[in-house]
Amino acid sequence: GGSQGKRVLLISTMGTTEPPANNSNNVMFYKLNAEAFIESSGVPYAIVKPCGLNEQAGAERELMVGHDDAETWFSQGYYMIPRRDVASVAAAALKTPQADQVRFDLCAKGTGSGPPAASEELLREALLPWQRSELWA
């Protein structure tokens, strides 16, 4: 019983950093609330915030991680990621001990830019500087 040895995984979305526009349906507001609730729960967690999802084949693109919607991916033409790639990184986040409190943006470059880096490498990049340790070396 209990939560020891377990981790919560939330697949949210990019775009939760800024308040929603007045004409929105507030879905980003509610997703941000879910993220905040999980982060404040005291339970180990991984929050993956992908850009737009598509049904294209996975493992064919370079994947990118970032934080707080600060990336310029959209202006560079990168705004979609295959669902399979999100699932692969999310599964690794559940199994990687050093990623027990991680929240990050995830997107993909264009077809043929891959294959993606190993999920563990992407999770290392997803850690904030103060979360990194020699365990990742």
Image (spheres, rainbow, N blue to C red):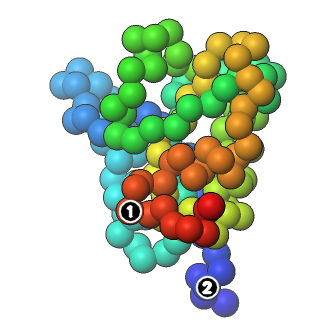
Q: Is residue 12 visible?
A: no
Residue at point 66%, 38% (across, down): 86
Q: Nearer the viewer, mark 2 or mark 1?
A: 1
| Whether residue 14 is situated above or below residue 122 in the rendered picture | above
Locate residue 17, reporting x and y percent: 30, 39
Quarter of the C terminus within the rendering? bottom right
Mark 2 or 1 closer to N-term? 2
> In the figure, is residue 73 to the left or right of 124?
left
Q: Which mark is residue 130?
A: 1
Within the image, what quadrant is residue 38 found in? bottom left
**Left or right of residue 67: residue 5:** right
Q: Name the residue at 56% across, 32% down.
A: 64
Is residue 57 at least partly visible in the picture?
A: yes
Q: Amino acid at mark 1?
A: Trp
Q: Amino acid at mark 2?
A: Gln
Which residue is at 43% across, 34% downward?
14
